[in-house]
Image (cartoon, rainbow, N blue to C red):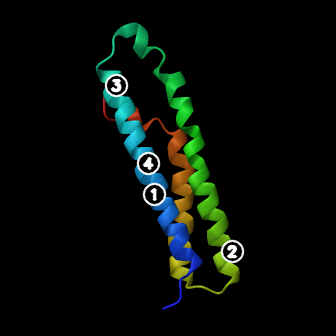
């Protein structure tokens, strides 16, 4: 079986998703155990995690390249959706869910 770029795109997206969810979870736990003055700064601290969207951008580029290499369309759609999700999630305040 030949290695396909779409598999690499899915792997990068999943790695980014796990990293994003873990970092937001840790941020929520830190917020929960901090005092009021420190809690006011957690919106700014969440901005530091915006750079994790690069995983999604790279995965989306690889997904589009795999479209030109005639790889399976179902996997391309899955990888594109995961990549877009990986791009969007750093900008959503997930850490507020775990408070």
Label 1: which secondary element = helix
Total residue callouts: 4
Distance (Cα) linking label 4 and label 1: 6 Å
Q: Which mark is residue 30?
A: 3
Label 2: which secondary element = helix
Tags 4 and 1 touching, CB below 8 Å: yes
Distance (Cα) linking label 3 and label 1: 23 Å
Q: Nearer the viewer, mark 2 or mark 1?
A: 1
The mark that comes first in sequence, 2 or 1, is: 1
The mark that comes first in sequence, 3 or 2, is: 3
The mark that comes first in sequence, 3 or 1, is: 1
Please provide percent x and percent y for residue 45: 51, 25
Which residue is denoted by mark 1 in the rendering? 15
Q: Which mark is residue 65?
A: 2
Tags 3 and 1 touching, CB below 8 Å: no
Q: Callout 1 environment at 10 Å: few (<14), some (14 to 19), or many (20+)?
A: some
Please provide percent x and percent y for residue 36: 37, 9
Distance (Cα) linking label 2 and label 1: 19 Å
Please provide percent x and percent y for residue 83: 55, 60
Q: Callout 2 environment at 10 Å: few (<14), some (14 to 19), or many (20+)?
A: some
Label 3: which secondary element = helix
Distance (Cα) linking label 3 and label 2: 40 Å
Q: Which mark is residue 7?
A: none
The mark that comes first in sequence, 2 or 4, is: 4
Answer above or below: position of 3 versus 88.
below
Which residue is denoted by mark 4 in the rendering? 19
Residue name at image x 28 percent, y 19 percent = 33
């Amino acid at each position: 079986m030949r290695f396909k770029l779409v598999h690499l795109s899915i792997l990068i997206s999943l790695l980014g998703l796990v990293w994003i969810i873990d970092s937001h979870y840790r941020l929520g736990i830190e917020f929960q155990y901090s005092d009021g003055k420190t809690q006011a700064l957690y919106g700014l601290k969440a901005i530091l995690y915006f750079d994790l969207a690069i995983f999604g951008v790279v995965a989306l580029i690889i997904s589009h390249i795999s479209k030109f290499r005639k790889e399976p369309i179902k996997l391309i759609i899955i990888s594109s959706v995961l990549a877009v999700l990986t791009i969007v999630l750093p900008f959503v305040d997930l850490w507020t869910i775990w408070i």
